[in-house]
Amino acid sequence: LFSPFHSGLVFSTICRTGELYLGGNLLTGQIPQDLGHLENIEILRLDSNKIKGTIPDSIGSLLKTREIHFEYNELEGDIPDVISNLVGLQHLHLDHNKLNGDFPNWIDSLPFLGK
């Protein structure tokens, strides 16, 4: 996904803005583990691309995140349990992927999700 970028430089710059909008850019590859370094990110949009692989566990470090938009990609695997760490999460869009496994039972523990 971020192979054309130098992730450290891009992520440190974006980290200050609080928002990352990369939807609809035909990005390919996987979501890098470095994503967890975006500790101040509030809105994360990687929707409508061609991203494959799994959602990295490092997403559980994004404690200030209110919105995650990963819909319309080719993500696989389970929804990581570490997303339950994101207690301020209001929107989680994972539809139109190839995710599998059981629907997470922790989803109801996120107090602001869908509100």
Image (spheres, helix red, strand yellow):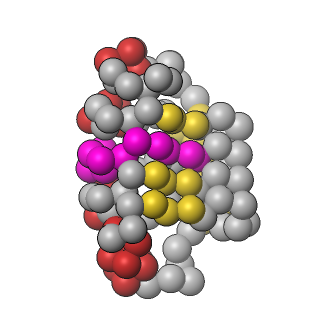
Q: Is residue 80 left or right of residue 86?
A: right
Task: Give the quadrant of residue 90.
Answer: top left
Between residues 75 and 69, which one lies in front from this camera angle?
A: 69
Q: Is residue 51 visible?
A: no
Measured along the vertical axis of the image, is residue 74 above or below residue 108?
A: below
Marks counted in the figure total 0
Which segment did they paint magenta?
A: 59-70
Name the residue rendered at 56%, 62% in the picture. Answer: 21
Q: Is residue 44 left or right of residue 108?
A: right
Q: Would you say residue 64 sits in the magenta stretch?
A: yes
In the rendered image, is residue 90 in sight? Answer: yes
Give the residue displayed 40% in from the left and 42% down from the top.
66
Magenta stretch contains residue 39: no
User: Residue 92: x percent and y percent?
Assistant: 51, 35
Would you say 42 lies left or right of 37 here? right
Q: Nearer the viewer, residue 58 or 113?
A: 113
Q: Position of residue 16 (x, y in %)?
A: 33, 70
**Residue at the image position 33 percent from the left and 62 percent from the top:** 38
Pick the quarter of the image with the N terminus. bottom right
Q: Residue 78, image x and y in percent?
A: 48, 33
Please tell me whether residue 25 is drawn above or below residue 81 in the rendered image. Answer: below
User: Residue 71 location, x and y as percent?
Assistant: 64, 43
